[in-house]
């Protein structure tokens, strides 16, 4: 397939046939799961909406990813419209974050996501500098690291138990009266939406599947 050559640039050895097999299985599991979730009572996520000053969001995010292991002596964090991580060279792995003052999720989870990418790059042995091995293995492995920190850690109850009190202290007017279990359910709400980077764990995969389908149609 002509798309094989393009897939191979990001995911060495992967083919359209292999992706189709994987996505067919994934779609078959996701669609009924999403429908089952839609039939349950809607989760209240109003605690994530309100007024969240950007400076406080940034301070909390920086403190959190420092605790995760992101090394600011070998990187920095800046503001952008679409979050990304870039590795300029040995000892210089930078991240960017998008903030919304009317919603807490964007700034928090884009920070955790990009820090995941950056910590993966910062963890590569400096002895490999100057070789083809001095970067992430594949795009898929890279994304597994960013989403591990964003979702498996950042949206977990253990994360909440360790960091939610600090978040409440940063935004007392908005969160002081919100119990952890309410916040936990809010940040894990499942909802269909048009923006992949703002989607939840369940619907995120469908964004990728649909994008793959569209790209195949364009090439064919």
Image (spheres, grey):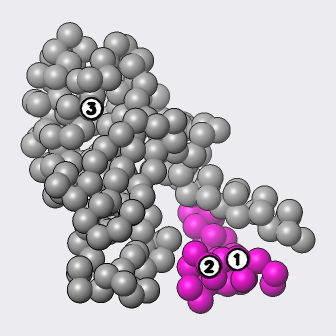
Name, please, the residue furthest toward the top: 173
Along the line of sight, the residue nearer the viewer: 8 or 206? 8
Q: Are marks 3 and 2 in contact (CB under 8 Å)?
A: no
User: Residue 131, how many percent across, how many down?
Assistant: 39, 87
Residue on which disc 3 sits: 58
- Considering the whole magenta stretch, tell me its main secondary structure: helix
Closer to the chain start, of discs 3 and 2, is 2
* Residue 166 left/right relative to 123: left
User: Residue 8, how many percent across, how many down?
Assistant: 63, 82
Q: Are marks 2 and 1 in contact (CB under 8 Å)?
A: yes
Along the line of sight, the residue nearer the viewer: 96 or 105? 96
Q: Is residue 151 visible?
A: no
Closer to the chain start, of discs 3 and 1, is 1
Q: Secondary structure at mark 1?
A: helix
Q: Quadrant of residue 214?
A: bottom right
Instruction: Quarter of the image for the C terminus: give it.
Output: bottom right
User: Residue 127, how many percent across, how many down?
Assistant: 23, 86
- Residue at image coords 36%, 80%: 134
Which region is colored magenta? 1-30
Residue on which disc 2 sits: 9
């Amino acid at each position: 397939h002509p798309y094989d050559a393009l897939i191979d640039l990001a995911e060495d050895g992967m083919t359209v046939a292999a992706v189709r097999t994987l996505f067919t299985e994934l779609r078959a599991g996701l669609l009924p799961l999403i429908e089952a979730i839609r039939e349950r009572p809607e989760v209240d996520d109003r605690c994530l909406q309100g007024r969240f000053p950007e400076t406080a969001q940034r301070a909390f995010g920086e403190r959190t990813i420092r605790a995760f292991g992101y090394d600011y002596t070998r990187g920095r964090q800046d503001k952008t419209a679409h979050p990304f991580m870039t590795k300029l060279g040995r000892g210089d792995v930078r991240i960017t974050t998008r903030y919304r003052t009317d919603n807490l999720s964007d700034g928090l989870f884009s920070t955790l996501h990009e820090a995941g990418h950056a910590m993966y790059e910062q963890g590569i042995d400096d002895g490999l500098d100057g070789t083809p091995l001095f970067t992430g293995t594949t795009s898929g492995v890279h994304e597994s690291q960013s989403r591990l920190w964003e979702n498996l850690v950042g949206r977990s109850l253990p994360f909440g138990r360790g960091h939610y009190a600090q978040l409440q202290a940063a935004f007392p007017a908005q969160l002081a009266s919100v119990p952890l279990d309410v916040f936990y359910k809010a940040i894990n709400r499942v909802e269909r939406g048009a923006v992949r980077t703002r989607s939840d764990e369940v619907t995120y995969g469908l964004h990728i599947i649909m994008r793959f389908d569209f790209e195949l149609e364009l090439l064919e």
